[in-house]
Image (cartoon, rainbow, N blue to C red):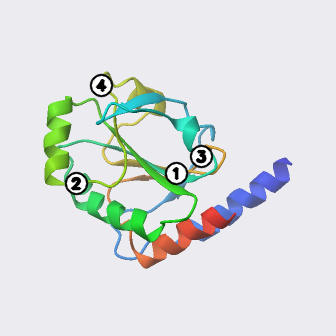
Amino acid sequence: MKIFNILILGFYFALFSTQASSASGKLKLYKGNLKSPEFNLTDMQGKKHSLSDYRGNIVLLQFWATYCTPCRKEMPTMNKLIKKMDGKSFKILTVNMAEAKPDVQKFIDEVPVDFPVLLDSDGAILSQWKVFAAPANFILDKKGNIIFTLYGGIEWDSDDMVKKLTALVKM
């Protein structure tokens, strides 16, 4: 079983080893504990979300902040990505990095989003995930394991990225 997992990770690495077109960042194979830390957070509308609720989907999990210029630029590409991935086992979750809800709401009013914005008001989840920069992106497999990371901005809706994420969904 361990050899099979290594082969799968090798496939993932080969699949994502080239830089996405038009992207300023690059997905990197995750080298830490693959099991993602669980969380239960509330979104801007007051709905609770558990990371485990999203098992069975490939998940793009992004930690972001209102002062983050790359976040402002890439969120519209995330909106386009979610539309391009419609009907597939793919979800986007974002976690704000311990900012006040009114500040987050002001940002969302300026940069509308088509995915949940979760609030980590005390920064506890940031600590668990060892997030130190914004944006911090994680791609989770269908079992909730972290398979890729990316620090910095990227055009999530590029044809290359959509192709790669679609391949992950089919696995």
* On screen, residue 63 above or below 49: below
Q: Position of residue 36 (x, y in %)?
A: 57, 37
Asked whether 142 or 34 is in front, the reply is 142
| Marks 3, 4: nearer the viewer | 4
Q: Residue at x 20, y 47 (%)?
A: 108
Q: Nearer the viewer, mark 1 or mark 2?
A: 2
Which sits earlier in the primary sequence, circle 1 or circle 4? 1
What is the crowding at mark 2: few (fewer than 14 residues within 10 Å), some, or many (at least 20)? few
Three-letter amino acid code of the residue under disc 1: Val
> Mark 1 — residue?
59
| Residue 167 locus on image (x, y percent) | 61, 69
Q: CA distance from mark 2 to mark 4?
A: 20 Å
Secondary-structure class at tag 2? loop
Q: Say whether residue 139 is visible.
A: yes
Q: Between marks 3 and 2, how big is the CA–CA gap? A: 33 Å
Q: How many numbered discs sit on the rendered protein?
A: 4
- Whichever of labels 1 and 2 marks the residue nearer the N terminus, that label is 1
Question: What amino acid does circle 2 point to?
Answer: Pro
Note whether residue 17 is visible.
no
Q: Is residue 168 left or right of residue 63?
A: right
Where disc 3 sits, the SS reads loop
Q: Residue 121 shows which numbered tag?
A: 4
- Describe the element under mark 1 as helix, strand or loop: strand
Which residue is labeled 3 in the image? 31
Badge nearest the viewer, 3 or 2: 2
Residue identifier under label 2: 112
Say if 42 sits above or below 32 in the image.
above
For marks 1 and 3, the one nearer the N-term is 3
Dot placed on the residue nearer the N-terminal end, 3 or 2: 3
